[in-house]
Image (cartoon, rainbow, N blue to C red):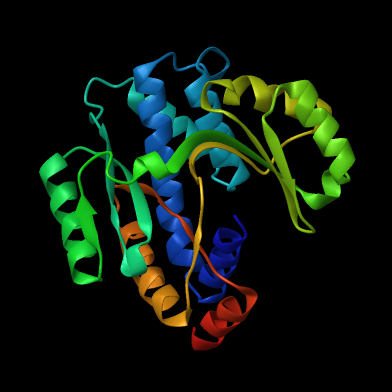
Amino acid sequence: MAGHSKWANIQHRKGRQDKLRSKLFSKLAKEITVAAKMGDPDPDKNPRLRLAVKEAKSNSVPKDVIERAIKKSQGGDAESYDEIRYEGYGPSGIAIIVEALTDNRNRTASSVRSTFSKLGGNLGETGSVSFMFDRMGQVTYLAEVGDADTVLMAAIEAGAADVESSEDDHVIWCEANDLNTVSTALEAALGESESAKLVWKPQTTTEVDLDAAQKLMRLIETLEDDDDVQSVTANFEISDEVAAALEEAG
């Protein structure tokens, strides 16, 4: 979504790069460990692990960190993580989905609930907002990989469901269960992608004003700073004007 890519750009320009990078490496390594522990430690034989490793590489996670994460999964003392999804509403009634990997459910639930409560949100029951999103596979390529028609044809051949092309990138959507197959086929046609992962895609989005955007930014950033939280998705949209104002405020 345009609002979300603008949001990412704002976050990076707010001087959070180093902090975000360190946390991102840790979260990607955790996903690799979980994927390897739940299946085969060989990425070629484990689709979830293959995608986790691919996402880590696309975010410049060092090879030795990836290898350690896989090795860690095979140790007898490897932590056991539970996958949990939290759902709720943020400022202006924006629907938010938080995905976590945790070795302590009570700690994570308490932290997430507290963050929602303190920052203008309201944590709901499981299923309270996820019906407004579709679980989809998302493969992203930079614009220079080819024009819109070239990427569309490759996506159709790969079995994708939809393509959104802009001046910055091509976002290719597919059914969640098809992500490994589609990303592999796209790789053969277009080369290495920037990203290939499962996401929650909002069915509709709500545009927010500057005040709501600032409150949402604080809530989302605080949630993302939690070591147990893997991803945060919200169904908002911000205009170019609001994005510019947020950058100025930062």
- x and y, in percent, of residue 225 in the image: 33, 60
Q: Tell which of 72 and 171 is nearer to you.
A: 171
Residue in view at x 55 percent, y 84 percent: 245
- x and y, in percent, of residue 170 in the image: 74, 46
Residue in view at x 44 percent, y 13 percent: 40
Q: Tell which of 157 and 51 is nearer to you.
A: 157
- x and y, in percent, of residue 209 in the image: 48, 78
Query: Against 27, is 31 above or below?
Result: above
Q: Tell which of 176 and 221 is nearer to you.
A: 176
Query: Against 220, is 23 above or below?
Result: above
Decide if residue 70 is on the left or right side of residue 244. left
- x and y, in percent, of residue 42 in the image: 51, 16
Residue in view at x 16 percent, y 62 percent: 114
Q: Tell which of 220 and 65 is nearer to you.
A: 220
Decide if residue 205 is on the left or right side of residue 171. left
Image quadrant where one finds the N terminus: bottom right
Count of marks, rendered view: 0
Residue in view at x 48 percent, y 58 percent: 21
Quarter of the rendering containing residue 188: top right
